[in-house]
Image (cartoon, rainbow, N blue to C red):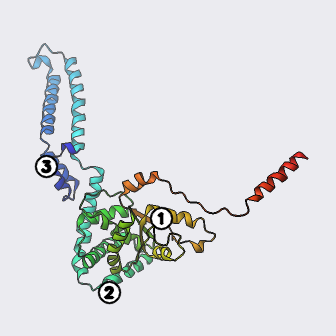
């Protein structure tokens, strides 16, 4: 559809809140497409007039009514198909409509709460998490607290990192919370979009894993997020390949015990395999696998997935027993 859009169309998609606004904006800038639609409409009307009045009534006696009917049918089908295709080009896509709905929600639900939250102290802001959990325990729905929860994360980000999350980041956070893929442009702040979705899942009592590409990004993102989550009463941990790789020192267990844990896909995968090789659940380092956010999803789920995770352990028991059992079976068969 991009080839049909005119200069400035992207801007209307980044500001509009209704599908009708986008449709009429594109229609006014349709240009050549509307000219062809008008020409086809004129031809259809002309053929319809010829069919109703007849060739003799219009001074075109050399035409036959059957020929006009066939022409009207063919041109009418093409005209209807072209108008439908043109309307489809002007209408926002399904993804665009989702973003428009989220933008309306941000402007009507989250933005009006900003001033009241700025008046709270750090302790009062941190107490909001306990309040949200209590409301959920009493039977409140996530929709009842979502707008205020997003506003709290935005305020915590502003205080801790002097970064007020933009509208596009709030929209991206809601997309991630709904377990969808959020495609964002360079510079839109993909790294901190996950804070919103992670906070909502933590309010539900779910363990959150945030998967990124390498150890440097793991530490950088975790250290950036830590003061933000601390302002809303959550703990952040991270794991790296060279730190307590076997999980025997307790470092990894402590990192997994946090509300939000950062790590690479390989480390999460190997910890899962190592846990399943242990003799008891009490020795596991990982917690429940409730929810994961994947940063750079194309790289991790496509490129990195081509490398399998393989782990092995020492053989248990005496392997010479296989030889003894084999000799006994051969003797039994011989007898």
Q: Is residue 278 above or below residue 296?
A: below
Estimate the x, y position of residue 327 in percent, counting from the top left.
82, 52
Nearest to N terminus: mark 2 or mark 1: 2
**Element under label 1?**
helix
Q: CA distance from mark 1 to mark 3?
A: 45 Å
Q: Nearer the viewer, residue 106 or 331?
A: 331
Estimate the x, y position of residue 161 in percent, counting from the top left.
26, 76
Quadrant where the image shows the N terminus: top left
Mark 2, residue position: 123
Estimate the x, y position of residue 89 in percent, counting from the top left.
22, 43
- Say left or right for 46 vs 229: left
- Say left or right for 90 vs 182: left
Q: Residues within 10 Å of mark 2 (few under 14, many from 20)?
A: few
Question: Which quarter of the figure has residue 261?
Answer: bottom left
Residue occupying the far top of the picture: 62
Q: Residues within 10 Å of mark 3 (few under 14, many from 20)?
A: few
Q: Residues within 10 Å of mark 1 (few under 14, many from 20)?
A: some
Mark 1, residue position: 268
Q: Are marks 3 and 2 in contact (CB under 8 Å)?
A: no
| Residue at x-position 50% and y-position 54% | 308
Q: Nearer the viewer, residue 128 or 297?
A: 297
| Residue at x-position 15% and y-position 33% | 41
Viewer-side label of 1, 3: 1
**Element under label 2?**
helix
**Element under label 3?**
loop
């Amino acid at each position: 559809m991009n080839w049909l859009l005119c200069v400035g169309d992207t801007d209307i998609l980044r500001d509009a809140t209704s599908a009708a606004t986008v449709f009429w904006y594109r229609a006014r800038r349709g240009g050549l497409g509307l000219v062809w639609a008008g020409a086809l409409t004129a031809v259809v009307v002309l053929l319809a007039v010829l069919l109703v009045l007849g060739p003799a009534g219009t001074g075109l006696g050399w035409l036959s009514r059957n020929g006009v009917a066939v022409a009207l049918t063919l041109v009418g089908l093409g005209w209807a198909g072209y108008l439908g295709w043109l309307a489809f080009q002007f209408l926002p896509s399904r993804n665009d409509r989702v973003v428009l709905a989220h933008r309306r929600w941000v402007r009507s639900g989250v933005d009006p709460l900003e001033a009241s939250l700025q008046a709270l102290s750090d302790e009062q802001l941190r107490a909001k998490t306990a309040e949200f959990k209590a409301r959920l325990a009493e039977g409140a729905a996530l929709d009842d607290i979502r707008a205020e929860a997003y506003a709290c994360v935005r305020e915590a980000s502003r205080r801790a990192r002097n970064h007020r999350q933009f509208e596009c980041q709030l929209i991206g956070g809601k997309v991630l919370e709904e377990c969808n893929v959020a495609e964002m442009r360079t510079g839109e702040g993909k790294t901190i979009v996950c804070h919103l979705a992670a906070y909502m899942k933590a309010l539900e009592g779910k363990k959150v894993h945030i998967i990124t590409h390498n150890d440097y990004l793991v530490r950088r993102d975790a250290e950036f997020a830590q003061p933000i989550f601390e302002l809303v009463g959550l703990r952040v941990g991270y794991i790296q390949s060279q730190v307590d790789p076997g999980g025997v020192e307790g470092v990894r267990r402590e990192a997994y015990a946090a509300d939000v844990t950062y790590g690479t896909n390989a480390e999460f995968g190997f910890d899962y395999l190592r846990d399943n090789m242990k003799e008891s659940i009490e020795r596991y380092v990982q917690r429940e696998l409730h929810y994961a956010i994947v940063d750079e999803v194309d790289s991790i789920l496509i490129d990195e997935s081509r490398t399998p995770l393989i782990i092995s352990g020492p053989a248990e028991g005496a392997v010479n027993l296989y030889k003894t059992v084999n000799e006994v079976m051969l003797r039994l068969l011989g007898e």
